[in-house]
Image (spheres, rainbow, N blue to C red):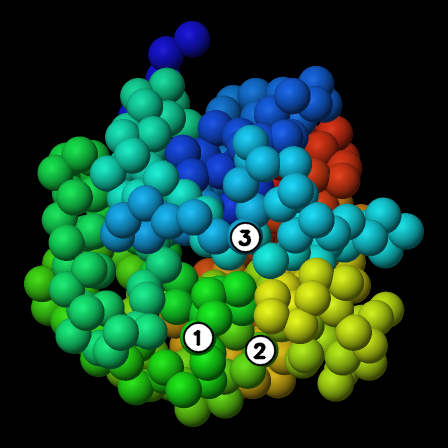
Amino acid sequence: MNKSSEHKPLTNILISTCFGHGGMGMFPYIFYPPFWILLFTAWLTNTAIIAKSATRYRHHGNYIWWNLFTYKFIHRIKDLQSILNSYGLTNPGVWVCAIMIKIAWTLGFNVVPSFFVNFSKGYETGYKETMEALSIFRRVLGKKFCILELNPSCPNSGEDILSNQRNILRLCEAIKREFPYLTLIVKGSIVYPSSFYAQLEETGVDIIHSMNTIPFDVAVKLGISPYEVSPLGEKTKGGYSGNIIMQPAFDYTMSTVVPTATIPLIFGGGVSADNIAMLFNKTALVNKEGDARDTFFAICTAATYNPIKTAKLLWELNQ
């Protein structure tokens, strides 16, 4: 079953992160037969899959798949169809991730590479590691490396997300200058002000991915957290994803991101087959008022809870 590995455009519904660093599934979901149906449907419909973020070098975060003691950092809240996680960016490094994506492309999966930029050691180090990573992606993936998601806002990175805005803007300008052929997606966060998104557009960023996680402390302030104290511990409080964050994520995107940036937008955060009709209808109202931007919807946690429902959605909307 070979298909062209040429990169396809983004699709109406995207799968974000839950298909792993190579875009063809991740532990433990890959051992769940209904997940195979979702994986096959994503392949069949050329669904855009945003890979789980790579870092420049191999990184051990909180969760290690072969260490049972680290499973506590993925806290599933089944009655709310949500997850509180402090995965911590565990990954094998950009070289391995790029090779995994190359294999996925060869098999016909439509995978978008993702890179986490680390500014904990200052801008210059973050810049250097990013440019090295993009050069590696280019070397492994070749000329078909034409799109990238930059992830500067992971709540489990240990950085102060709010304070890295200037570094992100400088880096985006540099990426567009040195890799002008790249379609650049930047993942936002609920902690950023509206001005940040307008500035992203000014730097030449092509697409904004509003978010897919809300940090634990922010969720507590919003009144959506079922816990006052994180069950993951004070050091690694984690971030929420799934149904629990859908409404605040959507409200933030519509009130903060949409009015200040005109570039295409990926709605993320709690998107599922159960609420997609509502999300489509509400965003269509914006378009009727003269907003002609392309809009996409990214599913992550819902795909792990309801892979069959998600597969049906891909079949209906990504054909």
Judge whether residue 297 can be spotted in this image. yes
User: Quick check: 154 left or right of 79?
Assistant: left
Q: Classify residue 158 as left or right of residue 176.
A: right
Q: Position of residue 298 (x, y in %)?
A: 57, 52
Q: Are marks 2 and 3 in contact (CB under 8 Å)?
A: no
Q: Nearer the viewer, residue 291 or 95?
A: 95
| x and y, in percent, of residue 161 in the image | 46, 78
Q: Residue at coordinates 32% horizontally, 52% vertically from top-left?
A: 55
Task: Say which mark, if any, is on residue 159.
Answer: 1
Q: CA distance from mark 1 to mark 3?
A: 15 Å
Which residue reaches farthest right? 79
Residue 96: name its quadrant: top left
Residue at point 43%, 48% (across, down): 60
Secondary structure, mark 3, is loop
Distance between mark 2 and mark 3 Cα atoms: 23 Å
Judge by depth and name the residue closer to the eye, 168 or 271. 168
Q: Is residue 92 above or below residue 271?
A: above
Which residue is labeled 3 in the image? 62
What amino acid is at disc 2? Ile
**In this view of the protein, which residue sits in the foreground, 100 or 236?**
236
Badge 2: few (under 14), some or many (20 or more) residues near its Cα, within 10 Å? many
- Where residue 70 sits, quadrant-wise, is top right
Q: Which mark is residue 278?
A: none
Q: Position of residue 216 (x, y in %)?
A: 68, 72
Instruction: Write down the residue under mark 2.
Output: 190
Marks 2 and 3: which is nearer the front? 3
| N-terminal-most mark, 1 or 2 | 1
Q: Secondary structure at mark 1?
A: loop
